[in-house]
């Protein structure tokens, strides 16, 4: 229905024009800032209490007057109740709140208007078609409002990406990280680095121009070298942390593994809060990898249920075991599940020796695989708990049947995922996109060329190249192709 509605609106927008408007409106969508006025439904689609329709461009004031004639524009940034009517037929459309945002004090930096109408499809359709009949207005492209805000300097490119991430955030950690980026933390960090490079470049160029003069103070090149070394250390630290930010944005890979009948599928169902996997007392029920995106303790994760690790089974289950071992190698975090009442069985001992022990032997660092050992079926244990074993590493007791121990498991997951994805509440801003990592690596490589070259002119050029990479992170010198990729993820109306 909404696709058909947008087709009607676009058709209305291509209707008869006055000669003046035809000279301003081309056949294609103009670039931001070309003078076209755009409009779109900016709130969620479907029946709702209130729907927000917005415009941006020089004809926004004319559009607002056309639908509320003969009234004057309301005071800037103040909501006023107005009767909306079709500008051609005069037919009443709705009684709505309207707001007027004169540029440059608006989201896009242009004149903007908002219509807060009742959210029924017929009302929204009527108002959109009425706006489409106003000369000089056309339907907005996906992300065009935000792209105009970027073009007018209201948002940097990293803030635009933060806004996109905030719209798509599904967990608490994603929301916090996106909000920090929208607030400009990553952009400010890059600007600070660029300022350091500018100072170093000024020192090098001053030495090139006045190196033989007595007026140049001593230690100019040494200061530039010191600034570059400090910046290299900062960039290297952020690049080592780059994968954490990308995991926070897209989700960490959490694999549930263990012997057959340990309760892996029950744990997956408990964590995902839905019957994802079939649970049966028959061993080998899960024969393939089942994956579901979940919110684990506020962090995004891709949870994988795998086949029970055992030998001497049929060819189908053998393939499932092979895929399970393959997923274990790719996991960011392993949830190793054992039957707490059956720790002495050969399958449990083999799993402890081949999966749990090697992971525990690795030195903990940012790149190593992390593991949580979960002893399930604690409801079957005697009051004293599981039999003590000198080879048993630290573990968490859980009963998927009663839910006892779930809070402790979620708290342990929160700590582990904070290490895997980074804690968005503390520390420096994370690099959430491959584009950020690419340009930071390019900057670091250019600084390496600066240190290696003996020619001062080439050294200065290396600093310019490094500064250019930092500028492209925040939007300076970005190509249209890069901008198209970034803005196409936005919905129409944002």
Image: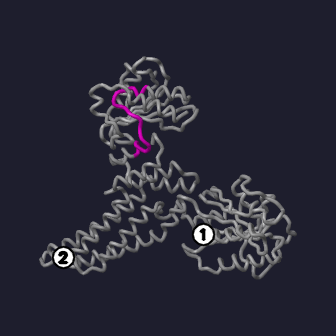
Q: Which mark is residue 474?
A: none
Residue with the most extreme right position:
382
Rendered view: 17 above or below 199: above
Q: Residue 102 falls in which quadrant of the image?
A: top left
Question: Residue 450 location, x and y as percent?
Answer: 29, 76
The tag earlier along the polypeptide, 1 or 2, is: 2
Query: Do callouts 1 and 2 mark residues in contact (Cβ within 8 Å)?
Result: no
Kindly tell me whether residue 183 is visible in this rendering.
yes
Q: Nearer the viewer, residue 347 or 97?
A: 347
* Element at label 1: helix
Tell me if mark 2 has few (under 14), some (14-19) or many (20+) residues whose alpha carbon lies within 10 angstroms of its own.
Answer: few
Rendered view: 59 above or below 349: above
Residue with the most extreme left position:
213
Per the image, the residue denoted by label 1 is 330
Q: Residue 199 falls in which quadrant of the image?
A: bottom left
Tell me if mark 1 has few (under 14), some (14-19) or many (20+) residues whose alpha carbon lies within 10 angstroms of its own.
Answer: few
Rendered view: 23 above or below 197: above
Per the image, the residue denoted by label 2 is 217
Q: In the rendered structure, which segment of residues is drawn in magenta?
A: 130-146
Rendered view: 22 above or below 368: above
* Element at label 2: loop
What's the distance in space between the residues labelled 1 and 2, CA to CA? 55 Å
Specify whether 246 is left or right of 14: right
Q: Nearer the viewer, residue 274 or 467?
A: 274
Q: Quadrant of the N terminus?
A: top right
Question: Residue 132 location, x and y as percent?
Answer: 41, 29
Magenta region includes residue 455: no
Question: Residue 98 location, x and y as percent?
Answer: 44, 29
Residue with the most extreme top position:
90
């Amino acid at each position: 229905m909404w696709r058909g509605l947008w087709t009607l609106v676009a058709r209305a927008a291509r209707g008869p024009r006055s000669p003046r408007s035809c000279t301003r409106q081309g056949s294609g969508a103009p670039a931001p800032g070309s003078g076209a006025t755009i409009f779109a439904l900016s709130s969620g689609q479907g029946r709702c209490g209130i729907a927000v329709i917005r415009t941006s461009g020089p004809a926004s004031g004319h559009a607002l007057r056309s639908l509320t004639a003969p009234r004057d524009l309301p005071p800037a940034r103040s909501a006023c109740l107005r009767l909306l009517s079709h500008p051609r037929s005069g037919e009443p459309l709705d009684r709505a709140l309207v707001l007027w945002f004169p540029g440059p004090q608006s989201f896009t930096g242009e004149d903007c208007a908002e219509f807060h109408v009742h959210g029924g499809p017929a009302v929204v359709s009527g108002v959109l078609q009425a706006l489409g009949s106003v000369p000089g207005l056309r339907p907005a492209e996906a992300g065009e409002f935000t792209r105009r805000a970027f073009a007018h300097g209201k948002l940097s490119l990293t803030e635009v990406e933060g806004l996109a991430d905030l719209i798509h955030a599904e967990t608490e950690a994603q929301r916090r990280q996106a909000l920090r980026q929208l607030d400009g933390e990553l952009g400010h960090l890059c600007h600070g680095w660029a300022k350091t490079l500018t100072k170093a470049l000024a020192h090098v160029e001053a030495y090139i121009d006045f190196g033989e003069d007595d007026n140049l103070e001593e230690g100019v090149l040494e200061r530039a070298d010191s600034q570059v070394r400090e910046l290299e250390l900062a960039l290297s630290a952020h690049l080592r942390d780059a994968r954490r930010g990308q995991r926070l944005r897209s989700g960490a890979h959490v694999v549930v593994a263990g012997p057959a009948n340990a309760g892996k599928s029950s744990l997956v169902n408990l964590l995902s809060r839905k019957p994802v996997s079939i649970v049966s007392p028959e061993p080998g029920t899960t024969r393939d990898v089942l994956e579901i995106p979940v919110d684990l303790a506020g962090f995004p994760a891709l949870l994988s249920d795998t086949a029970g690790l055992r030998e001497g089974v049929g060819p189908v289950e053998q393939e499932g075991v092979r895929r399970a071992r393959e997923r274990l190698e790719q996991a960011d975090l392993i949830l190793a599940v054992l039957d707490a009442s059956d720790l002495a069985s050969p399958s449990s001992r083999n799993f402890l020796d081949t999966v749990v022990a090697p992971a525990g032997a690795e030195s903990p660092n940012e790149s190593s695989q992390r593991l949580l050992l979960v002893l399930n079926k604690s409801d079957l244990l005697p009051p004293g708990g599981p039999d003590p074993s000198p080879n048993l590493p630290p573990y968490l007791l859980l009963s998927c049947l009663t839910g006892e121990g779930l809070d402790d498991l979620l708290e342990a997951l929160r700590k582990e995922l904070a290490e895997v994805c980074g804690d968005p509440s503390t520390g420096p801003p994370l690099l959430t996109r491959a584009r950020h990592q690419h340009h930071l690596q390019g900057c670091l490589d250019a600084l390496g060329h600066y240190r290696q070259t003996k020619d001062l002119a080439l050294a200065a050029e290396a600093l310019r190249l490094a500064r250019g990479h930092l500028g492209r992170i925040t939007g300076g010198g970005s190509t249209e192709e890069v901008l198209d990729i970034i803005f196409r993820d936005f919905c129409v109306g944002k």
